Image: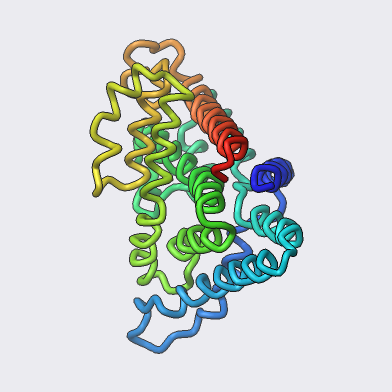
Amino acid sequence: MVLIVFLLAYMVRRRLDSLDLLNGDDVWRRWFRNGSRVKAGQETGIMAGLALVVLPAFLLALAEYLLTSSGWRMATYPIEFLALVVLMGTPGWRPVLRAYAEAWQRGDMQSAWLHVKDHLPGAERGAALSPEAMHLSLSKALMMSVFQRFFLVAFWYVVGGIGLAVLARGLVALADQWPQAPARSRFAGMAEWAEWVPARLLSLTFGVAGDLAGWLRETRHTLTGVTKKSGEVLMISANGSLTGYALDPARFSRIHKDEWTAFGGRSLSAVRDLLNRSMLVWICTLALLVISGVV
């Protein structure tokens, strides 16, 4: 049933994303308003934020345990389904990427930047970014958004149940949405630990779902690099797994000068296809684990 629940939640979530409905970030943002008031000088505190994430994770895990031990395991599946639908999802990305690709096609880099600037990291929102740097920053932001809102949730749901899935996703939400900005870096550090294993597992999946030979050349040290952040690991792995220099704009512009205006849309399409194929690999692997009785 774990496979069926996840598949149903994944399909519903993808449909909601296409309709730009039910943004999980908004749900977290409203929930975190309960910790928006702090005393002066305590803006870096993390206990309130952790409590707001640990509480729903613990309650869901407890409910799952009590229902299962009471012989009502079937009653937990609707709860898990609803929780997964809320935890997953990247609504709002599709129209942004479409407008960005169209602006890139016209050669209007200023317009392209205006469409995506809110999705870029704060330190990389400068209007003076080169087209190459802007595109790589956007590609990384897209990849991390999909990873944190689908693959991270899927991994911890299968490994530890809905409680751990909420906890892992909640740490990411704290790093992005917590009202007190000075504390976000501390939450980001915790989220990195939750992402360490699934990010490297997804990196391996890129090799299976993409160009294995290129992946082997690029990712010799990323899997074992303890200090490498998730975004860095995924970008290096994706660059090796994609053909046609999809994540190497500098080399693409030198080799395919006449096709430069099509690069933005083609590159993003390649990244999205790689992520979709990787999720298919994860689903097939989960199916095999269910069949073998491991899950």
In the displayed orientation, state which residue is furthest to the bottom: 39
Taking the spot 52% from the left edge, 44% from the top edge, the residue there is 151
Left or right: residue 236 compared with residue 150:
left
Taking the spot 58% from the left edge, 71% from the top edge, the residue there is 56
Which picture quadrant has residue 191? bottom left
Percent x, y for residue 109? 46, 33
Q: Eyeballing the image, is 25 above or below 242?
A: below
Left or right: residue 140 compared with residue 101:
left
Taking the spot 45% from the left edge, 44% from the top edge, the residue there is 144
Q: Quadrant of the C terminus?
A: top right
Left or right: residue 17 compared with residue 152:
right
Which picture quadrant has residue 287? top right
Percent x, y for residue 52? 52, 75
Percent x, y for residue 22? 70, 55
Q: Eyeballing the image, is 143 above or below 281?
A: below
Visible in this render: residue 150?
A: yes
Percent x, y for residue 2? 65, 48
Which picture quadrant has residue 215? top left
Visible in this render: residue 104?
A: no
Q: Eyeballing the image, is 285 above or below 231?
A: above
Left or right: residue 253 compared with residue 165:
left
